[in-house]
Amino acid sequence: MVVFNSINTLLFNRCFLEKEKLTIYKSNKLIEARYASLTHSEQLLLLSCIGQIDPRSYTGDVGIIVTASEFADLANVNKRYVYEDLKKTANRLFNRSIVIDMPDPDMPELTKTKTRWVHSCDYFDKNGKVVFYFSPKIMPYITQLTGAFTKYKLNQVSNFKSKYGIRLYELLIQWQSTGEREIEVDWIRERWELNYPRVSVLKTKVIEPAMEDINNHSDLWVKFSQRKQGKVITHFQFKFGIKASANKNSNAVTVEKFVQDHPQLTTGKSVDEVIKMMREQEDGQIDENQQNLFE
């Protein structure tokens, strides 16, 4: 639902932002695009905006609100200066750019697009909030996703420390069905815009901190090995999976809790139908943003 505020800015009318309930939907092209890694707070701010939209219907004319108190909860920053931190993070995010290769399959002569993540930010100093508007060129990669895309819960990455943790997590979760992914070392350098010529430094500064975040703070476990051509390390080989504790917590959801969390999905359904929905959701076949499957 949207409303007009006093300055005729179209805004979401929503409750307090809860990272546990936000699901991130991204086109795989966006995940594999080229850009210098955002700081962790910039990534959380961006993901909190993406997580608020309905990827089926969002058109970009609606402002995405993040309040100072929400940002404090999201990024674990000092609440005394949180609005200033929110504004600084918003300013940095506004100046960030991203390069997407071969953005339009119907226009092969278009080799790449460079765009900002957000095209404008509105600051409400007296209310302690910032309103974000996604760049038009970003919209096809977070809405109307009919091709290859990846989804995950924001709370799986919100406690990361390394600015590379989220990017590695996204690359792995893309291949969740296989549990393995091999990534070329030079590809990571290019896509993440890294200046670490020595692989040993790349591992110490980037890969190992990212893996530590994933192993300590997400639902995944991950380990890696290396592939060489001669004496040169050319690829990282990752093996990963869902932690047993995450599967146990998932299975602990009761029918009553599922109904409370998904009222629109379960209204008018029998207990057997709800149990079927729960099993399908565990298998990744449905989620709360795909309610049309049961209408």
Image (cartoon, rainbow, N blue to C red):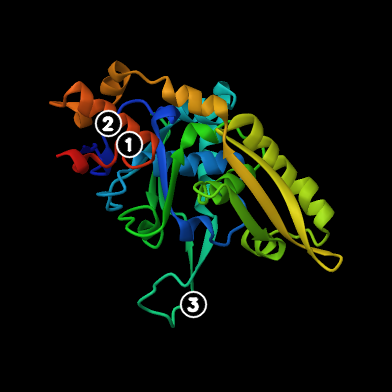
Badge 1 vs badge 2, beta-carbon distance below 8 Å:
yes
Task: Judge whether 178 appears above or below 129 on screen.
Answer: below
Mark 2 — residue? 276
Image depth: mark 3 or mark 1 in front? 1
**In screen coordinates, is 50 left or right of 166?**
left
The span from disc 2 to disc 3 (Cα, nearest Å) is 45 Å
Identify the amino acid type marked 1: Glu
- Residue at image location 65% in from the left, 34% down from the top: 215
- Residue 206, x across and y down, in percent: 72, 48
Mark 3 — residue? 111
| Quadrant holding the N terminus | top left
Inspect this view and state whether residue 254 appears: yes
Inspect this view and state whether residue 116 appears: no
Neighbours of disc 2 within 10 Å: few (<14), some (14-19), many (20+): few
The span from disc 3 to disc 1 (Cα, nearest Å) is 39 Å
Badge 2 vs badge 3, beta-carbon distance below 8 Å:
no
Mark 1 — residue? 280
Q: Quadrant of residue 78?
A: top right
| Quadrant holding the C terminus | top left
Identify the amino acid type marked 3: Thr
- Residue at image location 55% in from the left, 55% down from the top: 96
Secondary structure beneath dot 1 equals: helix
**In screen coordinates, is 227 left or right of 27?**
right
Q: How many marks?
A: 3
Image depth: mark 2 or mark 3 in front? 2
Identify the amino acid type marked 2: Lys
Secondary structure beneath dot 3 equals: loop
Neighbours of disc 3 within 10 Å: few (<14), some (14-19), many (20+): few
The residue lying toward the viewer, choosing from 170 and 5, is: 170
